[in-house]
Amino acid sequence: MTDTVPIKLLVVDDEAALREPLADYLSRQGFVVRQASSAAEARSRLRDDVPDLVLLDIMMPGEDGLSLCRHLVETRHLPTIFLTARGEATDRIVGLEIGADDYVVKPFEPRELVARIRSVLRRAARAAPEGDEEVFVFEDWTLDPLKRRLIDPEGAVVAISSAEFRLLMAFLEHPRQVLDRDRLLEMVQGREAHLFDRAVDNQVSRLRRKIEVDSRNPQLIQTVWGGGYMLAAEVRRQPAAKD
């Protein structure tokens, strides 16, 4: 993302009274903004043009925002911010666990939303691979950061969300190091998630269910009581195989 390339946003909200003024405001801030009034319309627009970030309402007729968010983070790896009137801690935790990058409660200050958009995009840019294409290999598992593709020891692709990808990257870049919850939350979710310690615990549990032989007796991602979590595996970097 550079200053010369406009950032593209997709605003998905069934309330035109909120969606249209917000899109107008964001356009004046220099973003290229497209709108969708439903999850179905959003899916249609995504076939034509992929945005850099999606602003997504939760409560919508038909498919709700939680379902659409799950699709966005698991199949398209798109940064997503929820815009919703549901402000309870439980609702926020659910949104973050699904893989949303941030959660903004209506009514909100538009300038703060712009700051959060830029923060999420900076975090996504830091997670993007740089330089030569390399993959991480650990215990016969392979993670391709460029393609965000996790491959199990039998060679099958395992779907992971954007949050799970960032969590696994944090462990792979710091193998055999104890990472406490605050540090993991900052790496995975940024400033908003520090309020919810459970968010990182549940994300670790979800990741364990995908990469551990027995998630109830984890050998790869170990709990360090009073400290946090540690990836107890040797990690190798090697050139990515050419398709």
Image: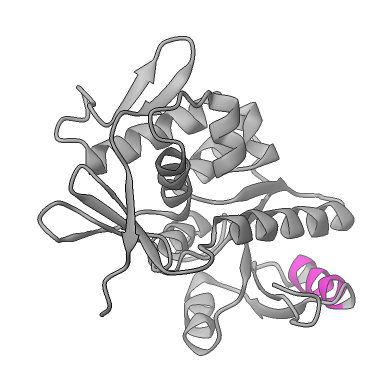
Q: Is residue 74 left or right of residue 141?
A: right
Asked whether the viewer can see residue 93, the reply is yes
Q: Is residue 94 left or right of residue 119?
A: left
Percent across and percent down for residue 200 are 48, 32
Taking the magenta stretch, the answer to whether it contains residue 240 is no
Looking at this view, is 114 or 41 the one in front? 114
Percent across and percent down for residue 206 are 33, 38
In the image, residue 102 above or below residue 194: below
* In the image, farthest residue toward the left: 154
Q: Is residue 66 left or right of residue 220?
A: right
Secondary structure of the magenta portion, mostly?
helix
**The image quarter in which residue 117 lies:** bottom right
**The image quarter in which residue 220 lies:** top left
Q: Quadrant of the N terminus?
A: bottom right
In the image, residue 14 above or below residue 122: below
At 18% from the left and 48% from the top, the residue drawn is 140
Looking at this view, is 44 or 190 the one in front? 190
Asked whether the viewer can see residue 57, the reply is no
* In the image, farthest residue toward the top: 226
Looking at this view, is 224 or 107 the one in front? 224
At 20% from the left and 42% from the top, the residue drawn is 139
Residue range (magenta): 18-27
